[in-house]
C-alpha cells in the first residue's frame, strides 16, 4: 500500500504511513483513489530518512521526541532571547536555536530530518571555527601589543616625569608621576600576558570541548542517512557538554547573567540526553 502524500510503500494493513505519518485508513481508499500504486513515480520522491528499517534513525528520533530535548530547546530559547534583550546578538546560537526547533517539529511528525541534523552540526562547527579564529586574532593582538610596548621603551616613565613636572609647576610635590610610570609598565606586561592566556583558552576550549561535540553530531546525521549506528564517541561528547555547561554556569554566577545560566542549563540537559540515548556505557 502506497501513501498518497509521499509515495512511500507501507506494509499491508498499516493505518499510518511510516515515513510521513499520513492516514492510510479505509476512508482514503474509498474516495476512489488507487492506493495500490503511487500517484507519481517513487523515484521522483525520495524521503530523507526511512524510519521503518533504520535502528540509527529510530534512536535519533527517540532522542528528538524525548521531553529532555524539548527542555533543551526551551532553555536555549530563553538564553538566546534574554541575550538579545540585553544586547548580546550571537548569530551562531540563533541559527542553532532555529535548527533545533525545526528538528523537534519534524520529530513530532515522526521524521528524523537529516537536513536539520546536518544544519545543527554545521552550526556547532561554525562556532568551533569562530573560536579558533578569535584565539588566533588575540594572539596577533598580543604580539603587536608587545612590539608596540617594546618600541615605546620608557615612554611610561617619561609620562610620569611630565606629570611630576606639571605638579611642581603649580607648587605641589608629588610622587604620583613616578608611580604612574612604574604602574604603566606593569599594566603593559600583565595585559600582554592576559591576551595570550585568553587566546590559548579559546583555542583549547574549541579543540578539546567543542570539536568532539561537532564530530558526534556529524556522525548522528550521517547515521540517519546511512542507517548505521556508527556514532562517534558519544561518551566524550556528553562529557564535553557537561564541562561547557559547568563553565558557563560559573560565568553566569560571577556575572549574575540569567541568559548565561539558561545556556549552561541547556548544555547540561543536552549532556544528559546524549547519555540516555547514545552513550552505551550507561
Image (cartoon, rainbow, N blue to C red):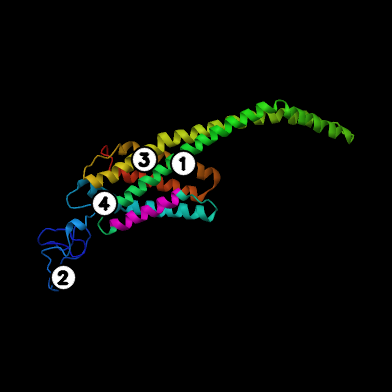
Position of the N terminus, as image quadrant, is bottom left
Q: Nearer the viewer, mark 1 or mark 3?
A: 1
Q: CA distance from mark 4 to mark 1?
A: 30 Å
Q: Residue furthest right?
A: 171
Q: Which residue is mark 1?
A: 130
Q: Residues within 10 Å of mark 1 (few under 14, many from 20)?
A: some
- Residue 233: percent from the left, percent from the top? 30, 36
Position of the C terminus, as image quadrant, is top left
Mark sitting earlier along the chain (2/3): 2
- Residue 141: percent from the left, percent from the top? 58, 34
Element assignment for label 1 = helix
Magenta region, residue range:
92-107
Residue in the picture at 49% in, 47% down: 260
Residue in the picture at 48% in, 36% down: 202
Query: Would residue 37 appear left or right of 150 to someone viewing this image?
Result: left
Q: Residues within 10 Å of mark 2 (few under 14, many from 20)?
A: few
Q: CA distance from mark 3 to mark 4?
A: 19 Å
Q: Which residue is mark 2?
A: 28
Q: Which residue is mark 3?
A: 213
Q: Which residue is mark 4?
A: 61
Amino acid at each position: 500500500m502506497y501513501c498518497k502524500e509521499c509515495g512511500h510503500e507501507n506494509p499491508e494493513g498499516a493505518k499510518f504511513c511510516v515515513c510521513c505519518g499520513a492516514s492510510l485508513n479505509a476512508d482514503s481508499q474509498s474516495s476512489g483513489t488507487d492506493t495500490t500504486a503511487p500517484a507519481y513515480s517513487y523515484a521522483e520522491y525520495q524521503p530523507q530518512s526511512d524510519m521503518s528499517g533504520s535502528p540509527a534513525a529510530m534512536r535519533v528520533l527517540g532522542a528528538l521526541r524525548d521531553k529532555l530535548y524539548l527542555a533543551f530547546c526551551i532553555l536555549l530559547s530563553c538564553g538566546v532571547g534574554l541575550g538579545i534583550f540585553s544586547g548580546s546578538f550571537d548569530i551562531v546560537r540563533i541559527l542553532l536555536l532555529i535548527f533545533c526547533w525545526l528538528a523537534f517539529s519534524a520529530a513530532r511528525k515522526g521524521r528524523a530530518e537529516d537536513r536539520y541534523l546536518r544544519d545543527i552540526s554545521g552550526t556547532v562547527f561554525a562556532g568551533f571555527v569562530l573560536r579558533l579564529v578569535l584565539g588566533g586574532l588575540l594572539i596577533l593582538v598580543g604580539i603587536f601589543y608587545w612590539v608596540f610596548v617594546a618600541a615605546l621603551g620608557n615612554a611610561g616613565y617619561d609620562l610620569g616625569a611630565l606629570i611630576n613636572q606639571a605638579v611642581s609647576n603649580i607648587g605641589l610635590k608629588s610622587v604620583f608621576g613616578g608611580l604612574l610610570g612604574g604602574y604603566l609598565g606593569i599594566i603593559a606586561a600583565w595585559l600582554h600576558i592576559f591576551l595570550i592566556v585568553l587566546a590559548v583558552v579559546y583555542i583549547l576550549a574549541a579543540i578539546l570541548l567543542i570539536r568532539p561535540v561537532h564530530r558526534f553530531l556529524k556522525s548522528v546525521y550521517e547515521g540517519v542517512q546511512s542507517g548505521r549506528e556508527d556514532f562517534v564517541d558519544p561518551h566524550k561528547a556528553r562529557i564535553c557538554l557537561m564541562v561547557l555547561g559547568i563553565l558557563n554556569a560559573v560565568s553566569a554566577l560571577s556575572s549574575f547573567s540569567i541568559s548565561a545560566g539558561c545556556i549552561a542549563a541547556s548544555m547540561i540537559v543536552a549532556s544528559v540526553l546524549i547519555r540516555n540515548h547514545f552513550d552505551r556505557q550507561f
